[in-house]
Image (tube, rainbow, N blue to C red):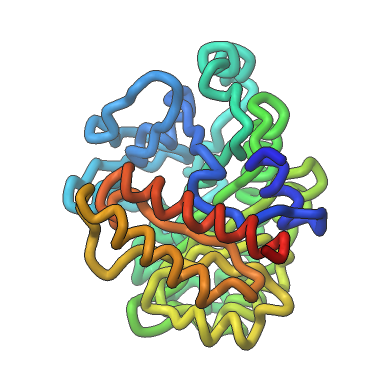
Amino acid sequence: MTPRENLHAFFEGGNWEWKPVGTDKKSFQPKEICEYVARAFVKEQEPFDNTKGGGMGWFGIEWEYEPGAGGSISLRPILDDVSEWKDKMVFPNLDEIDWEDIAKRNADYLNTDLGIEFTVFTGYFERLISLLSFEEAAMELIMEDYEEDIQELFTALTDFYIDFAQRFRKWFGADWCIIHDDWGTQRSAFFSPAVHKKMIVPHLTRFVEECHKVGLLVEMHSCGFIEELIPNLISTGIDSWAGQGIVDKRKLINLYGDQFKFEVITNPAKPFTEDQIEEAEQFAHDIFDEFKDKNIMFWTSPKRCGNMKVYQAICKVLKEEGIKYRKGA
């Protein structure tokens, strides 16, 4: 079974062979999509220097690369309030992109048995922040005067995101869509579960449903201490969620593990060096033993593991142990 086949089997109820790991997927974010350049997040066949990212992204929003963050930040709001979105937002015309040419240019890169993943920047609340400001977005999200405007905006964004995601499935055979929308600080969620359920959940649910119809798996990337929002997230039908270490995944797995396949972050507390491969492998064995009977997938970062060699060694152990465990060995 290939990593791509195993990924789909794990999340779609098939006969999977191991709990998916980071090396089972590869990211594809081509430079023809201006949002990827603006957000300094290009990943494709030809090397791209993401430190040269920034510039104009989707909807008329300009971004600037921030070295400290390793990504981009929006420079200035384009709306005074959300009621102006129909007049001032410019939705991209996806028909103007030469999808066939992108596929041809990246043919070797896309010729893989790994799952192809891509990112939708940026979901709902973060998009509202980039259009307004954090303070204005947080305030207008809960104000009755702006509810209709925000619901209409989020509906239009969902239509656009669905079209974008389904094109990635059609032209590039994408398997895994990450929708990016931070919902909290280090201490708490930005909004109550009730506001989240009313203003965001219906739109995210529709996005997930339409992605599933064409065979796309969907992951939520949402940082912050958002434990109170997890029941809402599960209700959308989304396939998994990558949260920060500040969230107690062990507690959440015990509470909701029978309903949801969490991603478990397996970064060591301190990066390993290349001469610590044995220690890294033991770390991976310990992590696997802790979660071997849980309904989860593993996620880890090459940078936080130490380097690519260490990262690959950790993922190799997690995969091999998963296969042995699944076979009852």
Please state the horizontal and vertical placement of residue 212, each as a whole percent of the image: 77, 50
> The C terminus lies in which quarter of the figure?
bottom right
Looking at this view, is 178 or 328 the one in front? 328
The residue shown at (64%, 35%) is 174
Left/right placement of residue 132 relative to residue 144 reads left
Residue 82 visible to the viewer: no
Looking at this view, is 106 or 265 the one in front? 265
Left/right placement of residue 253 relative to residue 76 reads right
The residue shown at (23%, 53%) is 69
Residue 65 visible to the viewer: yes
Please state the horizontal and vertical placement of residue 154, each as a whole percent of the image: 62, 57
> The N terminus lies in which quarter of the figure?
top right
Q: Is residue 233 above or below residue 180?
A: below
Left/right placement of residue 246 relative to residue 320 reads left
The residue shown at (50%, 78%) is 249
Left/right placement of residue 232 relative to residue 267 reads right
Please state the horizontal and vertical placement of residue 250, each as a whole percent of the image: 51, 82
The residue shown at (55%, 50%) is 178
